[in-house]
Image (cartoon, helix red, strand yellow):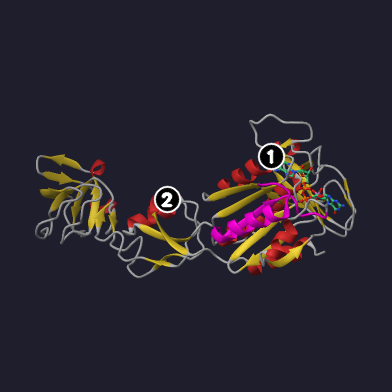
Amino acid sequence: MISVSEAKSILEKNTLKGKITFLPLEEAIGHVVAEDIFSPMDVPSFDNSAMDGYAFAYDPNSLNSFPVEGEIAAGSIPKGTLGKGKAIRIFTGAPIPAGADTVIQQEWVQRSNDQITFDIGKVKQGDHVRKKGAQTQAGTKILDAGSLITAGTVGLLASVGIATVGVFSTPSVGLIITGNEIKEVGQPLEFGQIYNANGPLLIAYLRYLGVEKIETFKVDDQPNIVKQAIDKALAIHDIIIISGGISVGDYDFVKEGLENTKVSELFYKIKQRPGKPIFAGKKSQQLIFALPGNPASVITCFNQYVKPSILQWLGKNNVWKPQVTLPLESDVNKNADLTFFLKVKIIDGQVKVLEGQESFNLKAFAQCDGFALIPEGISHMQKGEKVAIYLW
Ligand SMILES: Nc1nc2c(c(=O)[nH]1)N[C@H]1C(S)=C(S)[C@@H](COP(=O)(O)OP(=O)(O)OC[C@H]3O[C@@H](n4cnc5c(N)ncnc54)[C@H](O)[C@@H]3O)O[C@H]1N2
Ligand code: MOO
């Protein structure tokens, strides 16, 4: 059995990034930029006015009075060169005409017919002129590979005329739900049967991460049926997630099925609770996770191992680290041989360990903000000691 940190480092080394694919800007939000992006143009691409007002050539010794000749609206092309000592009516976003270098906003001038008057002493050369290239110069890097695409990123790329962005493609997932006792929600339950909680929760968690292509295989606990489902899923999908059947019972056929489909083992069993009998494997570029069937194991293992692997696939950084470290609200006792993952709620900056930590119990999951990692080698932690929290 390996430790939690060994398991994470094996997955970090073995998870590849998705293929680079180009998305229209509006669809790229939440993805990560796959390659450095350079601007094809200057922005602004011409000197333009930041105010509605008057453009003129600055001269500290000029008179305070200027005749106004013509106007330039945004989107129009200035004609000719503005003469010295003259002003032109200009609007926000309109090009600065040749001969002008400064804009005064209209609130600062008195206009009488075609003459404006203002105090030249209050103006600086270049006022309210947005210079060509002030935001971005052609050929300069505007985004580093690995940057998260936000609404701001989309705005920046559109401003330099880029319509599509290269991102790492989202993996497609084959989801295999094992168990003779498992019934779908909506069907009547007979004695001994339970509802399929793992299927819906895994689909929901995958969608939350942006995974759209999900195919579910529901299989009974029979060796040939389990193997067939693994084969089918491997033929199509990038990541295979299996729920249940990975422990040592007489009806657990997942390990055998994975061996028979030539999946190579990265690890089997981690010194942790819940989720000890987790399996991770690889086949060419594909990743395979067999999650122990108890719902707490499925959710916790997904949060700790599957989610970071998917985020790494999508090119995201720092995916293996906890999001916050916060003090415990009360003491915690545990078995020192294992890492414990506890469902916790964050209340006023303190970590409250929730009731109902058993592996079958889903109640605390509906209340928790995330999972506190209580490390291996420790049997007691005191109120106030800080713990690493992995949020949903
Ligand atoms: N002799 C041993 N028995 C068990 C061990 C062990 O080390 N030695 N480990 C225990 C631990 S820890 C876990 S976790 C489970 C994992 O077992 P499996 O992966 O083989 O899972 P199953 O036996 O198929 O199911 C376990 C449990 O979860 C329920 N389940 C399964 N699928 C679903 C589903 N889709 N939705 C809701 N609940 C599900 C299932 O009915 C079982 O109650 O093994 C322990 N045993
Ligand atoms: O790994 Mo399990 O501790 O029963 O969920």
Q: Nearer the viewer, residue 220 or 139?
A: 220
The numbered mark, 2 or 1, whose residue comes first in the sequence reads: 2
Task: Reply above or below: 292 against 279.
Answer: above
Q: Which residue in the rendered view is the most extreme toward the top?
A: 188
Disc 1 residue type (three-letter): Ala
Q: Residue at x 87, y 48 (%)?
A: 382
Q: Is mark 1 within 8 Å of ligand 1?
A: yes
Q: Nearer the viewer, residue 146 or 309?
A: 309
Disc 2 residue type (three-letter): Glu
Q: Is residue 108 visible?
A: yes
| Region of the chain picked out in magenta, as a range | 219-248
Residue where numbered disc 2 is placed = 27
Question: What is the C-alpha distance between the residues marked 2 and 1?
Answer: 31 Å
Task: Reply above or below: 350 against 57.
Answer: above
Residue where numbered disc 1 is placed = 197
Q: Nearer the viewer, mark 2 or mark 1?
A: 1
Q: Residue at x 10, y 57 (%)?
A: 79
**Could you tell me if the residues under marks 2 and 1 are in contact, i.e. CB atoms within 8 Å?**
no
Q: Is residue 316 visible?
A: no
Q: Position of residue 36 (x, y in %)?
A: 44, 67
Magenta highlight on residue 233: yes
Q: Is mark 2 within 8 Å of ligand 1?
A: no
- Left or right for 15, reference 356: left
- Left or right for 6, reference 96: right
